[in-house]
Amino acid sequence: MVNLAELKTSMMKYFALSLLVLLLNCGGRTPEPTEVPAHLPPAAKTDSTAKTTQPEKPIQLEALPPAPDGWTEINKLDSSILLDLRYATKNNFVKEKMYDCPRCFFRTAVAEALVKAHKSLKKKGLGLKMYDCYRPRPIQWKLWNKVPDPRYVADPRKGSMHNRGMAADLTIVDSKGKELDMGTDFDYFGEKAYHAYTKLPKEVLDNRKLLKSTMDAVGMKFTTTEWWHYSFRAKTFPVADWVWECK
């Protein structure tokens, strides 16, 4: 004969065990941590110990490697000369950055002549701003490959005055750094940029005349088709290939 008390106890144990199994299967177990997929970039991974990256401090000229013998970085002679080196940006006629960083070098004699011109303008409350300085021949090749037209870019096999560290593309600024009106922007290819073009306001013609006379006084000669381009003529230098360092 079945003992009712024992049967009742067995059934209670069975129901209790079944209930425990059900609870475990329905979420009673603690889930394992979810890992960030390994293919995501490091910045997307969670790291509670990560620190906020501070922006780098501007590079000081004193911390950069010096120019080779016979060359001078213009701002080390006179830091008040402004730089707007267009080929270190995309704001140029090829719409592409050519230089890794904006540094302005010339042959030492050329740099000294430009500083002399700048100082003469400062007496009038004015100054110089550089658009382009020494241009390494490897950069000339990059420009030539973009625009293989000698009307606009010198053939790097022959080299240019820029490749020799003898040419400057520049303009005049007032005491607040504002450019004087020269009639066109830098690297404007057309008759309006020619020195012989006179269908311009008197102010523009006077500004171009001032730039021309200032450069001529220090031995820098103009180019007929570009009001901004001046070359040193007292001495000739060979084409150079070295490229400045940026850090």
Image: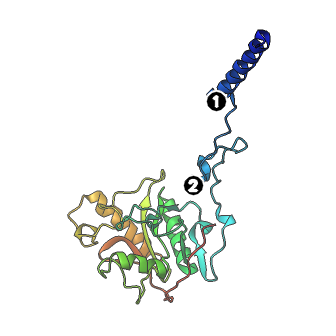
Looking at the picture, the colour scheme in use is rainbow
**x, y percent for residue 108:** 58, 79
Residue 78 position by quadrant: bottom right
Q: Quadrant of the N terminus?
A: top right
Name the kind of residue labelled 1 in the image: Asn
Q: Label 2: which residue?
A: 39
**In this picture, residue 103 sits left or right of residue 27:** left
Marks 2/1 in contact by CB < 8 Å: the verdict is no
Q: Label 1: which residue?
A: 25
Disc 2 crowd rating (10 Å Cα; few below 14, some 14-19, many 20+) is: few
Residue 74 position by quadrant: bottom right
Name the kind of residue labelled 2 in the image: His
Q: Is residue 57 above or below residue 210?
A: above
Q: Nearer the viewer, residue 120 or 167?
A: 167
**x, y percent for residue 159:** 42, 86
**x, y percent for residue 195:** 28, 72
Residue 224 position by quadrant: bottom left
Residue at 55% x, 73% y is 105
Tell me which label, 2 or 1, sits earlier in the chain: 1
Q: Is residue 143 above or below residue 32?
A: below
Count the marks: 2
**In this picture, residue 110 sits left or right of residue 200:** right
> In the image, which disc is placed on residue 113?
none
Q: Nearer the viewer, residue 18 or 117?
A: 18
